[in-house]
Image (spheres, coloured by chain):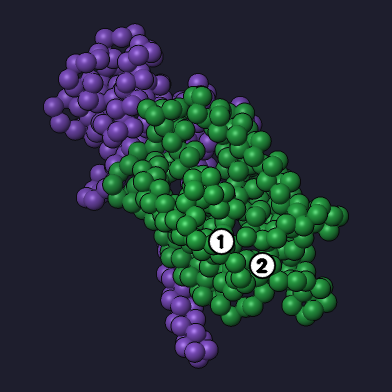
Chain colours: A purple, B green
Amino acid sequence: MRYKAIILFCIMTLFVSAQMVTAQEKEKIQKETRAERLKSLENRFFAAQKEGKTIKGVLVEGNSLFNSTTEPQKKPYGKPYTDEELLAARKSAERNSKVFLLGQDGTLYYPTVKRGEAVSESLGAYRFERILTEEQKKTKTFTWATLVPMVGRQIEVLGEVYPGYGGIKGLYIEAVGFEGEYIVGKK
Amino acid sequence: MATKKPITLRSIFYTVVSLVWIFGLSAIGHITMVLIEKNNPGIKYDFAWGCAITGFVLLYATRLVKSDGWQSFIGILAGLSCWFACEYSLMYGGHRLGVTYTWNGSYPEYRMMTWSYMFFLLVFAYLLFQESVRCNFIFYLRKKLRLMRGAIATGKIDNYGPRTFFEYIMITWAFYVLLMIGYDEELFGVYSWYTYSLFFASFSVFFYLCYKLLGYDRFGANLRYAIPTVTVIWNDVEILSKWGMLKEPWVHINWPIMSVIIGGFAVSTYLIVKDLRARSQGMIESKDIT
């Protein structure tokens, strides 16, 4: 019985080692650490901001926008919803209705993945890198953000704009910047 | 069920060390996941497989040790490893199904875990009716609900390892589900009466459990009973952070605080291992727990 246990243990150890080798290979591929990536994104974000190349807008929820239940495009910029509408929009967004960026100039952007990616995940579940100002860095706030908790809020995006279809443009978000906390339970 | 003894300096020492160890273990578990997600998310599923295999190997290894102390110690590590794998499997499921974060910030894997509550109830029902289960809480419920048909199970327990493994997983699962039900704004909400009640109930029950824990003066029973005690107070830590009143050092990676926790964990591990080794060598006299 003891020999059987030792054999079982050896097989499992071999399996774990094989997994670890695979992980190390993947690590080698991912040479750029997150800190380096964030630094580079930060530099590009602030450079683009200076040149006016970032995209500013508010995040709006798609279902209520496309069936005209809400009209965030007709509201003053920065306040796309009433309190009641905002709650409903957030609920829908967390039930995976799509989130769009309504630009300051009225352009509607559909957040998408980088051009060429055939199989992709829902962007509602995606963590975007967050660019922090020097003041925000001192607060030890989150260094990433996701779309759903940000519905109704203004954000600034570093990314690529694609032609899209029917007037709605595609937007690949590389990093976002915004004021305040990334909502974690705060009223 | 372990026999309760009077509170002594020795039992205070065992209680403090057990609480520090279990708390440290949970905190280190959390920061490990956060660091992987932050620095190298590409390895997380390989890590999860590693954890699952390690967990099952450790679980099997509990049959090779005799003392209830070592069995409990290894059982907890096995439980934690397998729990890591559970969380990562839900993370993977959430990713494949496109589960979003909630607007109040809850993660996809925990949103999915909320709806496992019925599975939890089924397993709990089994434990409730299984008369050989000697968990104090279940035993209390069984007595109050008049579910006992036969005599109370007695006699020596030889498989504390798997029992501790299962206890760790069940308790962690139960408290996650309780919290997530509270955080769901469509059921109760972060600022609902339910979450406030959970906070105050956890806070008061923690002291009661600490008092009960003080009655056990050896690491086997103490480690096992420290699991619910720490998990109950962990609830409060989680709720405070959800209310924005606390920034968890393992989520926001506060190294000075984490260093203290890791230091406490290292010292408590040393003390536990030292005590268990001394006990195995017969240097500390101990009677079997009935």
Q: Quadrant of residue A154?
A: top left
Q: Residues within 10 Å of mark 2 (few under 14, many from 20)?
A: few
Q: Is residue A68 above or below residue A145?
A: above
B31 vs B139, nearest the viewer: B139
The disc label shown at residue B136, or none: none
What amino acid type is highlighted by mark number 1?
Answer: Ile
**Which residue: 82% across, 73% down?**
B284
In the rendered view, tell whether residue B266 sits above or below residue B277: above
Residue A110 as seen in the image, left or right of residue B195: left
Instruction: State left or right for residue B90 relative to residue A113.
Output: right
Q: Is residue B275 visible?
A: yes
Q: CA distance from mark 1 to mark 2?
A: 12 Å
Q: Could you tell me residue B94's position as x and y percent?
A: 34, 47
Q: Nearer the viewer, residue B77 or A135?
A: B77
Q: Nearer the viewer, mark 1 or mark 2?
A: 1
Total residue callouts: 2
Determine which residue is flagged by label 2: B290
Position of A32 with respect to A170 (left or right) is right
Query: Mark 1 or mark 2: which comes first in sequence?
Result: 1
Give the position of the N terminus of chain B as an image quadrant: bottom right
| Residue B155 spot, x, y in % from top left | 61, 70
Please tell me how crowded label 1 is: few (under 14), some (14-19), or many (20+) other residues with Cα within 10 Å: few
Looking at the image, residue B179 lies above or below residue A120: above
Disc 2: which chain?
Answer: B
**Identity, as a three-letter code, of the amino acid under mark 2:** Thr
Residues A42 and A97: in front is: A97
Disc number placed over residue B152 in the picture, else none: 1
